[in-house]
Image (cartoon, grey):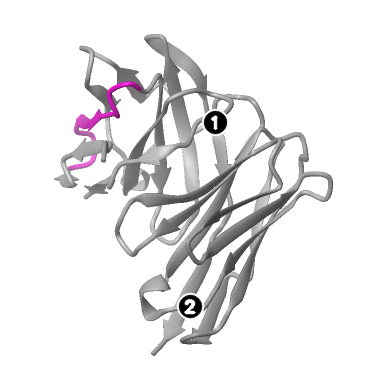
């Protein structure tokens, strides 16, 4: 069964460092997402990406965050200068079509900022 | 602004019991509602997707219903098993690009 894959599974970084989280969405999906979940809290929307551009972003997704689809398969989330409060599980998700599709998630990348 | 609430926040039941998890949303103009399962430290596994024109979906021991007008969905789990222990999340989309998630129900099924 096709799946969304994410790397790394866990990354530890120092405050102020740049981090890139990588995702390979399901191959025929068109819409791509990043969500995050701070420990013990709800899953929060960060950004959606369609047709090689951001289609929607939340208030959390400030100038420190960026997304890119550098080739036909990878989808990346970059955090330019990490803060302690960026520590969370980051989930990538993909959707085949907007109105009727089923959202599929990866296993997540746990980011720990020290 | 769409808000999604799930009740109860936690539930502990003996094995074999049938149970109902509740999800409510404030804006009834939704397109889809999806139920997910999350095991500790893991990703979200899709359980059931209910599109706006549908009233329920079934998969094995799971049945999800949707009442858009009242802003509610229920997930029914029949004959619960210890392997069903997990956090169950509902999420809705209102035709924008994002899904909004509820706070989740943490289920523990005791052997």
Segment tinted magenta in the rendering: A14-28
Q: Is residue A14 left or right of residue A105?
A: left
Element assignment for label 2: loop
**Chain of the residue under the numbered disc 1 shown in the image:** B
Q: Which residue is mark 1?
A: B98
> Which residue shows up at 38% across the image and 51% down it?
B45
> Which residue shows up at 51% across the image and 79% down it?
B79
> Which residue shows up at 29% across the image and 29% down it?
A26
Q: Is residue B70 left or right of residue A106?
A: right
The front one of A40 and B94 is B94
Q: Based on the picture, tell me whether residue A19 belongs to the magenta stretch.
A: yes
**Chain of the residue under the numbered disc 2 shown in the image:** B
Question: Most prominent secondary structure in the magenta stretch?
Answer: loop
Q: Please, is residue B108 above or below residue A62 in the view?
A: below
On-image quarter of the N terminus of chain B? top right
User: Which label lies toward us, 2 or 1?
Assistant: 2
Q: Are marks 2 and 1 in contact (CB under 8 Å)?
A: no
- Single out the residue that lies furthest toward the right: B69
- Give residue B80's mark: 2
> Which residue shows up at 50% across the image and 61% down it?
B88
């Amino acid at each position: 069964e096709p799946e969304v894959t994410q790397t790394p599974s866990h990354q530890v970084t120092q405050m102020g460092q740049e981090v890139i989280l990588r995702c390979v969405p399901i191959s025929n999906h068109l819409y791509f997402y990043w969500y995050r979940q701070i420990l013990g809290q709800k899953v929060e929307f960060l950004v959606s990406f369609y047709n090689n551009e951001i289609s929607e972003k939340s208030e959390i997704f400030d100038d420190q965050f960026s997304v890119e689809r550098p080739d036909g398969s990878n989808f990346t989330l970059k955090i330019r200068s990490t803060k302690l409060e960026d520590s969370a599980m980051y989930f990538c998700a993909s959707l085949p079509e907007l109105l009727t599709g089923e959202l599929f998630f990866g296993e997540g990348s746990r980011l720990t900022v020290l | 602004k769409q808000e999604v609430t799930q009740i109860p926040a936690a539930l502990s039941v003996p094995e074999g019991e049938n149970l109902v998890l509740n999800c409510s949303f404030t804006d009834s103009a939704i397109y889809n509602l999806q139920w997910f399962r999350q095991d500790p430290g893991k990703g979200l596994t899709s359980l059931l997707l209910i599109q706006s024109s549908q009233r329920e979906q079934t998969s094995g021991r799971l049945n999800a219903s949707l009442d858009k007008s009242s802003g509610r969905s229920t997930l029914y789990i029949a004959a619960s098993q210890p392997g069903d222990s997990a956090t169950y999340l509902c999420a809705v989309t209102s035709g924008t690009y994002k899904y909004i998630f509820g706070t989740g129900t943490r289920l523990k099924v005791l052997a």
